[in-house]
Image (cartoon, helix red, strand yellow):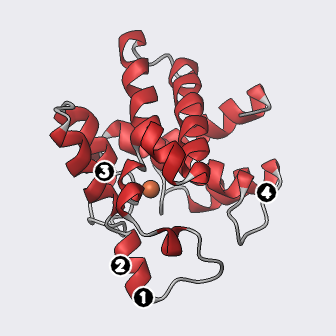
Amino acid sequence: LEKLYQYHRETYEHSLRVANTAYQFGKFINYHDYLLNDLYLIGAVHDVGKLKIPLSILNKKGALTQEEYSIIKQHPQFGFDILTKESISPYITKSVLYHHENWDGTGYYGLKSSEIPFFARIIRIIDSYDTMYYGRLYQQSLKRQEVLDELERCAGRFYDPNLTSLFINFIQLNGNS
Ligand SMILES: [Fe+2]
């Protein structure tokens, strides 16, 4: 994670926010206490594979070319490889590998609904929430309510619908993060 801090500060900060939000959300849905740390960990390392993506692509303003996009799409696999080398349990690494799956099966690997690891489904939502709320270099960030509307709109397509409505409740009750 420290390497990510040095390599790409924006991704590092995004990862920590996702980890924190994931932990709090796990608590909110009364998920098993002893698994909250794993959820935090997955949030913290979900984008660690971006270490292997050239900065010219990570920092590019505007749309990516098809080739750049296909390189970016490899970051879950890179992350999986890095973590597997560190002997992190498959249950963690699988959630990293599948954090860009869509509920309807149109994500990177085409897994759908319950085939997608539970934690990966949570990270998918929080990752999007954080990215839309805090914005990217080339994008304006959205207002909180706009982000929640967007999540709702894409529930069932990109996101697990049940988790999405829980997450929307969670954000509305908690106000921040
Ligand atoms: Fe990612």
Number of labels in the image equals 4
Above-or-below relation of 103 to 29: below
Number of residues whose C-alpha sits closer than 10 Å to that of mark 1, classed few (under 14), some (14–19) or many (20 or more): few
What separation in Å lies between label 4 and label 3 (alpha carbons)? 30 Å
Q: CA distance from mark 4 to mark 1?
A: 28 Å
Residue under numbered circle 4:
146
Q: Residue at x 58, y 21 (%)?
A: 28
Question: Residue 89: x percent and y percent?
Answer: 19, 30
Q: Which residue is mark 1?
A: 66
Kindly state the secondary structure of the residue where label 2 is placed: helix
Q: What residue does disc 3 label?
A: 79
Report if the beta carbon of the residue with label 3 is closer than 8 angstroms to ligand 1. Answer: yes
Q: Which label sits in the foreground, 4 or 1?
A: 1
Name the residue carrying label 2. Answer: 70
The answer to whether residue 161 shows anywhere in this view is: no
Could you tell me how far apart the alpha carbons at marks 2 and 1 are, in whole angstroms?
6 Å
Residue 82 in picture, x, y percent from top left: 24, 47
The kind of residue tagged 4 is: Glu
Q: Residue furthest top?
A: 33
